[in-house]
Image: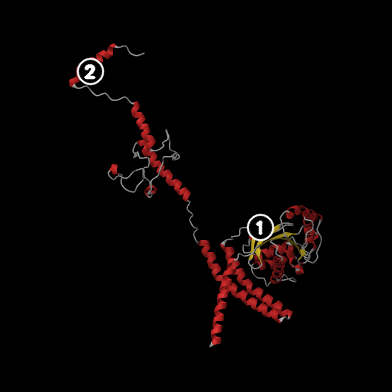
Amino acid sequence: MHDSHTRHVRRVLIAALSAVLLVLATAIPAWAMRVTFVRHAESAANAAGVIDTKVPGPELSPLGQQQAEAIAAELAAAGFDGFYVSSMQRTLLTAQPTLDLLGNPAYETLPGLREISAGIFEGSSEDEGLGRIGYALAPITWMLGARFLPVIGGEDGNSFDARVDGALRHIADNGDENAVVFSHGATIMFWVMMNVDNPDFGLMLSHQLDNTEQVVIEGSPDEGWTLVSWAGRPVSPNPSLPVKLFVNVRDLVVAPQTALYNIGRAFASGDVAALAQAVRDGVVDVVSAVVRFVPDTVRDIVDEFRPAPKVENDLEKDLEDDFQVANVHRVAAVTGTGTGTGTDTVTDGADSENDGDADPLESPKDKKRNGATDLSDGNKVVPGDKVTEPVKGDDALAEKQATEEEAEPAAQPEPGPEDSDDDAGDDDAGASEPAAA
């Protein structure tokens, strides 16, 4: 009985601790790094127009040396904290001018960054013909999720992705936040499109990377990657709905392929512990991909068709209301229909002086206002109205009317019958006096 109670308490504590750790893990922002891929400068094989993927490969052409020198100042000013090259010498020769400008900082050679093996297409034309098509055909299927297909005589998409992933994980483990990687055209283009969450396949068709051009990504090996720019062109981090749905399907079909590849490697090694680890990780990855697929897809569709929230600009609304009320007071002041209080109030009720008739100048928006509007400061004029004299409120109008009344002569009463003689005498006396000059 005591042992059963102890096990129950232990399970409760473990569950509570797991929940706490999960909350803490989701509260901590994911660490992200920036990686700038740089395609090497023109090699002798590029100048000859042939595919050459053997290690260490050819050196740079004279034009390639000039290209490496030309890009050095730009790269040296980018503030990179990690420098990496592939095991093919053309990448180190491209990086060397930049390293020289920076005082030759340390760099690392990562074999996983090498070019995609051409297999039987080695030495074929890289610009035209069957060799170019055959070399690119398998990597294109990798982008679409069929990573199990190999380049004939070369590697398949799983092994290619695994070696580049390993190189980037090594860079992340070094703690670099802004690393530069000198690599190869096919390696950069296909790995990026196979792995980022916002792939743009149109870029592969419209602008394949030229020598020394760059691709920038952000993210981490654990959290995934986002494409930032391609050959200097910024790429939106928010792809269209078809791209989002494609990425969901891609991740779903890639998970079992990766799991089987890792299990096969562990089995070939003969390490039982590694095999058990690969099986366990593979099951978790596949189940996670399946579990995420439906909610991710539903969320992407809902977000696409959800109406954008209407953001009302309170300042614009207040200004519009003020213009409406200012128009009412201005017209009322000019026509003499104001209250004379200086703080006329627009109300919902009937006008007491008009026996319930609504103010014809009152707009529907004015009728919704319950408070008074003070226009004593007033320079509020509706655009398009012609104003001959500035109106500063009902107080100013009252003062103006008083001044006009003082300037007018007082009206003379008509003489009555009882004083007609006296008035006549006075008129005669006034007529005998000379007029003032």
The circle on residue 180 is none
Task: Tell me which amino acid carries mark 1.
Answer: Ser
- The residue indicated by pointer 2 is 423
From the viewer's perspective, tell me whether residue 396 is left or right of residue 295.
left
Indicate the secondary structure of the residue bearing disc 2.
helix
From the viewer's perspective, tell me whether residue 129 is left or right of residue 412.
right
Residue at the (24%, 24%) spot, across then down: 413
Discs 2, 1 touching: Cβ within 8 Å? no
Q: Using the rendered view, name the quadrant where residue 268 is placed.
A: bottom right
In depth, the one of 127 and 404 nearer the eye is 404
Residue at the (30%, 25%) spot, across then down: 410
Q: Position of residue 208 (x, y in %)?
A: 69, 59
Q: Position of residue 416 (x, y in %)?
A: 19, 22
Task: Tell me which amino acid carries mark 2.
Answer: Asp
Task: Please say which color scheme the image uses.
Answer: secondary structure
Which of the marked residues, 2 or 1, is nearer the chain's N terminus? Answer: 1
Residue extending furthest bottom? Answer: 1
In depth, the one of 217 and 230 nearer the eye is 217
Indicate the secondary structure of the residue bearing disc 1.
strand
- The residue indicated by pointer 1 is 229
Q: Position of residue 75 (x, y in %)?
A: 73, 55
From the viewer's perspective, tell me whether residue 169 is left or right of residue 431.
right
